[in-house]
Amino acid sequence: MDYLAIPGAQVEVTPLILAPLALVAWLVVLSWWVRSLDHPGRLRRKFRSQRLWWEIRVKRRSRMRAAVARANHARKHERSDLPPDEHVSWASFWMVEIYLGSHAPDLKQSFERLGWTEDSPGLGSINAEEWLADARAGYGLSWTRLGFFRPRGAKLFPTATPIDLPEPFAFLQMGLVQLGPGVTALIANFALAEDEQSCLERAIREAPAARGELAGHGGYRILSPELVKAERVGAERARIRGEAACWIRDNLPGAFSTRAVDPPTWDLITTTREDLVKEFRGFFGWQDALGFRGAERWKFMSGDRDDPELAIYG
């Protein structure tokens, strides 16, 4: 027999008393739940919406697969295919890092670690540490060349200074420009290795296929073959640029590196026949996969009929 402890008293509690209490508690909970439904129709709509939600989740995958098949069947992406007689070459790119007054001590330590604290004919410049001190003390625009570098063990460019470079690059040229009091810019020209210069062309020539992605609330979105191709090209550019940005961050960190921001970059991309930017194009072409839609164009004409026209896009 169970007892309920009350100060100063002892009351006997039997199962006959507990059963009605449990029933009352269950009725209170049930009445609260029914009141939360406002009216009986709300309960039917609740179960109906749950069933509809499950149907959407189960069926949206099949609808997404059907939409992907339709996008691939349309074959509109044929216009974005690179012509057989066209070639795209990514020769090199320029990357810029900025050093403010707070970065001066770290930049001097970087010079010491790289061995740029003495005059070196291989570097093609004077003592980089001394130049930095003189340039920051002045008020005019000045610049110096840090040198021409190649990967260690590479046989190409034997007169270049050997340095630890990532595999995608054949050589590296660097220079410093004093932009103003306390502001120095590093300009690094990374030249791609021969097998990497055609990485963008390989990404464009690879046959694209549409892709579906599930979204919230039972929806989905379809990425057309053209967008998939543009993503693929962008991934190749990000891979190569990322190697260069990591090298600068590890060896000559500055304002962009410390803030985990991608440094400003300019690519040198050449073609053999077609322009990268056309005056009008009502469809997604292979040039758009390279990111040149809406780019500005500068033309250079030498005046000689035998000289080809030079067009620069930015």
Image (spheres, helix red, strand yellow):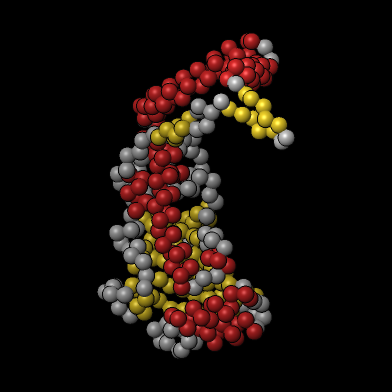
Q: Quadrant of residue 91?
A: bottom left
Q: Nearer the viewer, residue 16 or 191?
A: 16
Residue 304 appears anywhere in the view: no
Residue 164 appears anywhere in the view: yes
Who's the residue at 60% across and 17% down the image?
16
Who's the residue at 45% across and 81% down the image?
113
Q: Nearer the viewer, residue 209 or 260?
A: 260
Q: Quadrant of residue 2?
A: top right
Depicted 221 relative to depicted 305: above or below: above
Q: Looking at the picture, how far across and down is residue 152, in whole percent?
A: 31, 75
Who's the residue at 35% across and 43% down the image?
82
Q: Looking at the picture, how far across and down is residue 76, in whole percent?
A: 40, 31
Q: Quadrant of residue 222?
A: top left
Most extreme residue toward the right is 8
Most extreme residue toward the top is 40
Most extreme residue toward the bottom is 119
Depicted 169 relative to depicted 47: above or below: below
Q: Looking at the picture, how far across and down is residue 226, in whole percent?
A: 42, 38
Q: Nearer the viewer, residue 33 or 129?
A: 33
